[in-house]
Image (tube, rainbow, N blue to C red):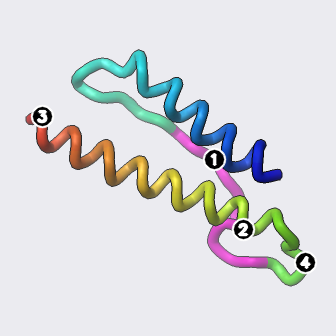
Amino acid sequence: MWRFNVMALTLYCQLSLKPFPASGGRIVNVSSMSGHRVPPSGGFYAPTKLAFRSITDALRAELKSVRSATS
């Protein structure tokens, strides 16, 4: 689960940033509600989705600061 839900996300986000134009673009990450609330039988799935959400939030903040610095 860690390799698919977290490591694959980071790899594909990294690869998708390379062809981005200087003006920007969009990355859409679709996760599940387990990243927002942990179900009673969540097991290890919920923490991987929380990491997914956190990585997406961090990437958004980083790209926003880069974009504002170049404008």
Q: Amino acid at mark 1?
A: Val
- Residue at left 67%, top 43%? 7
**Real-space CA distance between mark 4 and mark 1, rounded to the nearest whole angstrom:** 21 Å
The numbered mark, 3 or 1, whose residue comes first in the sequence reads 1
- Residue at left 48%, top 36%? 27
Q: Who is closer to the viewer here, 11 or 20?
A: 11
- Residue at left 87%, top 72%? 43
Location of residue 19 in the rendering, given as x and y in whole percent from the top left corner: 41, 16
Tell me if 62 is positioned left or right of 16 in this view: left
> What label does residue 47 carry, if any?
2
Which region of the structure is painted magenta? Answer: 28-38
Q: Where is mark 1, residue-wise?
A: 30
Label 3 SS: helix
Q: Where is mark 4, residue-wise?
A: 41
Location of residue 42 in the rendering, given as x and y in whole percent from the top left corner: 85, 73
Q: Amino acid at mark 2?
A: Pro
Residue pushed farthest bottom?
A: 40
Asked if residue 30 is among those painted magenta in the image, a careful observer would answer: yes
Cβ–Cβ under 8 Å for marks 2 and 3: no
The numbered mark, 4 or 1, whose residue comes first in the sequence reads 1
Label 4 SS: loop
**Real-space CA distance between mark 4 and mark 3, rounded to the nearest whole angstrom:** 45 Å
Q: Amino acid at mark 3?
A: Thr
Asked if residue 5 is among those painted magenta in the image, a careful observer would answer: no
**Real-space CA distance between mark 1 and mark 2, rounded to the nearest whole angstrom:** 16 Å
The image quadrant that residue 18 belongs to is: top left
The numbered mark, 4 or 2, whose residue comes first in the sequence reads 4
Nearer to us of marks 4 and 2 is 2
